[in-house]
Amino acid sequence: MLKPISNSRTDFPILNREVNGHPLVYLDNGATTQKPQVVIDAISDYYSKFNSNVHRGNHSLSMQATVAHEESRKNVCSFINAASEREIIFTRGTTEAINLVAFSFGEGFVSHGDEIVVTQMEHHSNFVPWQLMCQRKGAHLRVVPIDKNGELDLSTFKLLLSERTKLVAVTHVSNALGTVNPLEEIIPLAHTAGAIVLVDGAQAVQHISHDVRAMDADFYAFSGHKIYGPTGIGVLYGKEKWLDRMPPYQSGGEMIDRVTLDKTTYNTLPFKFEAGTPNIEGSIGLAAAINYLAQFSPLEIQTHEEDLLDYGLERLKSIPGMIIYGNPKKRSSILSFSINEIQHFDMGTLLDLYGIAVRTGHHCTQPLMDALGIAGTVRASFGIYNTREDIDILVEGIMFVKKRLGK
Amino acid sequence: MQNMHEIQKQLVDNFNQFETNNEKFDYLINLGQSIPEMRSDQKTESNLVAGCQSNVWIDIRCEDYKLYIEADSDSLIVKGIASLLVLVLSGQDASEILNTNMGFIEEIGLWRQLSTQRGTGLTAMLAKIHSAAEKCRDLQK
């Protein structure tokens, strides 16, 4: 029996608190989501009942922790419909997952003169690692521009693809504009050109469908803390055929098979890419978050968040001086805007005085801000617990700030 | 000219007459509006101080071993913060600036909001003023 989304709000204890004397209105879910009680309990249970290091221990606690940690991997595997748990690498987050591929794929497969294609709307986490890898390997970075609606210019993308293209790195959902990119077109185009594709799913997995095999992504990365789980845990999905042939990223404990004075052989997947003691509380918390989300219908999550977007767009557009950034055909859970003559930092700081949490600035997408010719925006981003009332309060808050600053 | 300690005390007293953060922010924004406007030709790359979320320009002149400071920002709040520095430090002796503790900003009651925001660039503004003060003081040697 699925749980209705309207009941989700009470699962998140933090939403009961006040900020600056007002009930918290949390609209910064693109940065991180709040945690339901079941996630908090799962982490607390781990530490109070079976905390122990995983894998090589032969005592009960270690075996219990190992089972829980590896169950979490299975959970993630079915959550994104990967073919095998060997394809699920636990990382610190999306950033580390992308850095892992940029390093290991770069070392294994990229040579002087090769090309990597990224897009102008990438978060710095899916831009800088490729820039650095290109510098290291003597490869060239090609950047897909965006059009006036904040969508990728696919005709230029096609022109950028060539036999020299080794990898295409693209975000599923833009963290600054909410644009949902047409992976169903991008991935086959890249594959036809002989390139593989890494998808940054940080802003997608909690909102829209994320079947890695259906989309045929070669790599897919996301963070636990943006899907109602804890910080410090993330996932790199990679097709086994690539992970198998890539050299290790970091080295040390866990990732070895046999170490001698002369050489080291590596552990099997996924452990080859997981040096050191893993984030056990993180994987357990992440699994609790995935289980929590599984109580709701994915369609209802999507419908609810689309309703918030439509309502938010309509309400924000009614404010004089409002500029909404991006007008994509498909948008997910993010509205980026500014008000004439009010600097975004001022707007964010003053909205906080009314208990409203939004994010302001360049959202770690400076190449995108450059393309838009702006320094930053105010971003409201939604999660399952947000309501139309939250948007009403945001609009009221913006009107207060406007009045206060005489704009 | 009032000494820096007196100006700091006055500013802290002014802020403390307001009870709410709302009123304090309004006062901070008003302070920012009260300092002289910067000319556009002063808003150069070299006068720009890196803040994460706003542009702030600090133009500093050294005359008779004293610093004369002007500031502007596209953010009204950041301009308010910059105006605190201008009001206390501009026109003061460079070596005295280097010996003055600017801890009063912690006492105006908005410290939690201002110090944790990388966007304000407060530390970078102070560093720029201190570096100019060192050069200005060293002219005496």
Image: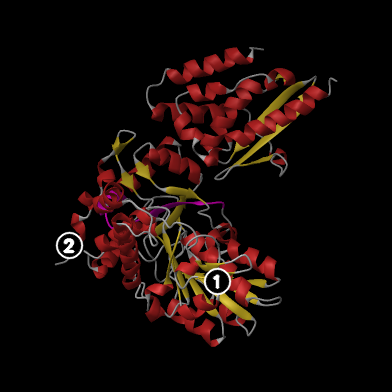
Output the chain of dot 2. Answer: A
Which of A35 and A273 lies nearest the eye of the viewer? Answer: A273
In the rendered view, tell whether residue A217 sits above or below residue B136. below
Display colour scheme:
secondary structure
Which residue occupies the extreme right position in the image?
B141
Residue B54 lies, in percent from the top left, at 57, 43
Labels 1 and 2 positioned on one and the same chain: yes
- Which residue type does callout 2 highlight? Lys
Q: Is residue A145 left or right of residue B97?
A: left
- The residue wearing badge 1 is A265
Q: Is residue B36 left or right of residue A323?
A: right
Highlighted magenta segment, given as a residue range: A375-391
In the rendered view, tell whether residue A307 sits above or below residue B106. below
Say which residue appears at 54% left-offset and 65% top-offset.
A100
Tag 2 or tag 1, which sits nearer the N-term? Answer: 2
Mark whose residue sits in front, 1 or 2: 1
User: Can see residue A149?
Assistant: no
Is residue A386 inside the magenta stretch?
yes
Which of A235 and A347 lies nearest the eye of the viewer? Answer: A235
Q: Residues within 10 Å of mark 1 (few under 14, many from 20)?
A: few
Q: Is residue A348 left or right of residue A115?
A: left
- The residue wearing badge 2 is A3
Is residue A53 inside the magenta stretch?
no
Which residue occupies the extreme left position in the image?
A1
Residue A354: image quadrant is top left
Residue A308 lies, in percent from the top left, at 30, 59
Residue A178: image quadrant is bottom left
- Which residue type does callout 1 highlight? Thr
Residue A261 lies, in percent from the top left, at 62, 65
